[in-house]
Image: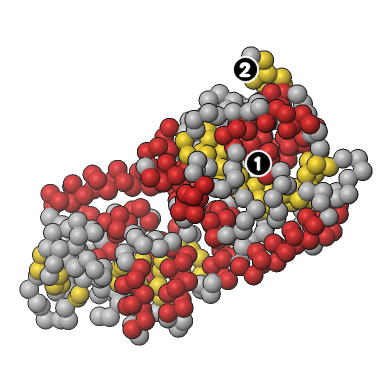
Amino acid sequence: MKPEIVLCVDSESAKNPELIGLEGENLLSQPWLRLFCSAVEARAYLREADAVKEAWVASSDEMDPINLAAALKKDAGATSVCLVTFGGGGSLKSRASAAGIDATLTGADFASRYSSAKSRQPGAPRLSRAGADRKPEAATVCESVGRSLDLPTVAYPAGSGDETVCPIQGNPGANRPPSASESVASETKGDACGDARKASLRKTAFLITVVSATGGAGKSTVAALSAFFAQGFGYKTLLVDADLQAGDMRRLAGEESPVAIDEVIADRSRLEKAVPRESQPALLAAPKKLEQSESVASGLSRVVDDASSLFDVIVANTSSHWDESLVQLLERSSHVLFLVDQRPTSLGLSKHVLEMCSRCGIATTPFTFVVNRCTKNALITSFEATCSLGGSRAVELKDGGKEVAELLGAGLPLELIGTRNDLCLSMERVLIDILPGNAALGQAPPSSSPERTRRFFLGRRKGRAACL
């Protein structure tokens, strides 16, 4: 039997299908399914295969799923390519559509599609963990060790039918069914990995990304205040300084020795040292060395993904340079605060960026346009911004005056919030509107949730913040 469907997953999910919602399935025993962990070999196979009807992309050892799905669609346009998303928002679906990917499947959709495809194959073996120590009905020959899956070599004698080649390219030998003792060991290890992955899927941080079309719009100020307000509302919050070249969040947040993004990329365990303290959010700072910014950019999205299961809210400050790392943040974002300032060129450049987002398939539904430094006689108000930007939602942040620069410049954001400054009051109202109820984060709401109490910060004395 020639495989009708290609499934791309990472090695861990291939060993533990419960991580992708296929509890108890033996993916390697399905003759209608061809499994790949290597993106390169999946592409090479699909270019030559003529019997493949669909390709499902859940993950890969080498490429982001959306990039692999787009590449497979380009390689074999006649094959239907589906991207499996365990989360992700409208921006990811828009990018997938713009790349020509035929469909995006939620975890539930994927499980249903798999079950339907399997039910159409009456002759396919139906091995579960309970019967995993039985040999497959079709003869299987795998000649060498599947290193990435860590499975030993085994060969079965040829039977009456066609031999089934090991479906994980580059990992021959992986098709061996485990013995009973190995099944127990595998289940123990798989359950631990599965519990971690499922916990990660249950809890995904609400990511707020602060962007603008130009520098000097006030992104750092808005990002810092957003993180401190979210932490004060009771959310476990992480502030990420993704302005990798000019980020000064260390100074604004008053943190002398925070964990830096490049340190987490080098050693993931460093992320555990980024811990909030009372009303102080955790901070991941920009690299200290400017020359490291380019190399750090490629790992930024992975850092955010890793942090997403550890925090309720993540606030990302960004640079004014729109590149691939920023696009990856946007596709992960729950909400985007797009700053427009009072310079005449600000609206024009914002429109220019919106046009780019449209061309690149970046959904702008989560965008809120924030007109910064508004005064009574401001040149640009939320009304002008809404009209100029094609009816996009816009709100205003009041001008906070010299007090903002003085207190933030001294690393005293909580003292600034405690002054009840006009900027802080308007910033607080914006955040109360966009932050989710904690039920959306997979946990019980804290007593200080903005949806339950909408409480406000008061003054702060001797390093202690009081809230009503």
Q: Residue furthest top?
A: 462
SS at circle 2: strand
Mark 1 — residue?
A: 220
- Counting from the top left corner in percent of width and height, residue 358 is at 66, 67
Q: Is residue 418 above or below residue 69?
A: above
Label 2 – label 1 distance at C-alpha = 23 Å
Question: Does residue 233 appear in this view?
Answer: no
Who's the residue at 32% across and 78% down the image? 45
Q: Is residue 60 visible?
A: yes
368 relative to 323 in the view: left or right: right
Q: Report which residue position mark 2 lands on.
A: 464
| Relative height, residue 439 to residue 133 (above, below) | above
Q: Along the line of sight, which residue is nearer the eye, 77 or 406?
A: 406
> Image quadrant of residue 174?
bottom left
The answer to whether the residues at label 2 and label 1 have Cβ atoms under 8 Å apart is: no
- Please rate how many residues cluster around mark 2, counting C-alpha atoms within 10 Å: few if below 14, some from 14 to 19, many from 20: few
Q: Which of the image's four quarters has the C terminus?
A: top right
